[in-house]
Image (cartoon, rainbow, N blue to C red):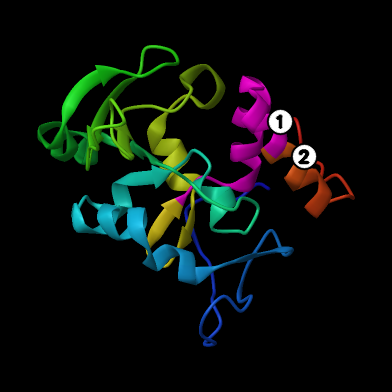
Amino acid sequence: MNRTGPRELLHSTTSGDAPGTIVDSRCPVLHKRLNTGLFKDLKGLALPADDFVIAGSAPLYIRDLRDEVSDLDVVAGERCWRQAQPLGSLQPAPYGDVLSVGVVERKARPVGPIEVLNAWFPPLFGNVAQLIENAEVVDGLRFLTLQDTYRWKERLGREKDRDDLSRVRRKFPEAPLWWGN
């Protein structure tokens, strides 16, 4: 999957969850999911959409490879990071030398269901600007690619990640070449 720059994904004019946007030619995006809860909250923060990428399990959720997400991991470029810092409490993220700001906080979560991070597994992905550049753009929001989502979930190997990877492999039994790269 060698390409440069964000790819604005085409979508159908049909309503609801009808498959329309095709990701990697095989996996429809459910646009209806982008008009709910956490995505509305994220849009309400008015962060610069061209300077962040949504990572975590959300790329699987919008592609119907996961039934739900309890939070959004937003990986911020420099401009977005500066704008997000006053929105919540600055804390170290669980992996590596990464910082996070929890916004739209809820009492049950120490960081909040929207977590803005200044990096995403740097040993695996390196530069945030590159993640943003390579992101897939869906309805104006940038998402980590399926390839990159698969890579970090494979690296972490938690039970929930193994479950997600299993769903992806069932969806793509032909084992795309990018798995495990």
Q: Residue at left 20%, top 39%?
A: 79
Magenta stretch contains residue 123? no
Q: Residue at left 31%, top 30%?
A: 109
| Image side of residue 163 versus residue 102, left or right | right
Residue 117: horizontal and vertical position, in percent? 32, 30
Residue 5: horizontal and vertical position, in percent? 48, 52
- Mark 2: secondary structure: helix
As drawn, 36 above or below 70? below
What's under tag 1, amino acid-wise?
Arg
Q: Quadrant of the C terminus?
A: top right
Magenta stretch? 143-163
Q: Tell me the quarter of the picture where residue 151 sits.
A: top right
Magenta stretch contains residue 145? yes
Residue 166: horizontal and vertical position, in percent? 77, 39
Residue 77: horizontal and vertical position, in percent? 30, 37
Which residue extends farthest right? 174
Question: Which label was assigned to residue 162?
Answer: 1
Label 1: how many residues lie within 10 Å, few (<14), some (14-19) or many (20+)? some
| Image side of residue 171 versus residue 151, left or right | right
As drawn, 43 above or below 95? below
Asked whether disc 1 touches disc 2, contact meaning CB atoms under 8 Å apart, the reply is yes
Q: Residue at left 63%, top 46%?
A: 146
| Image side of residue 113 versus residue 94, left or right | left
Q: Residue at left 61%, top 21%?
A: 156
As drawn, 72 above or below 46? above
Question: Which label was assigned to residue 26?
Answer: none
Say which residue label 2 marks: 166
Label 2: how many residues lie within 10 Å, few (<14), some (14-19) or many (20+)? few
What's under tag 2, amino acid-wise?
Ser
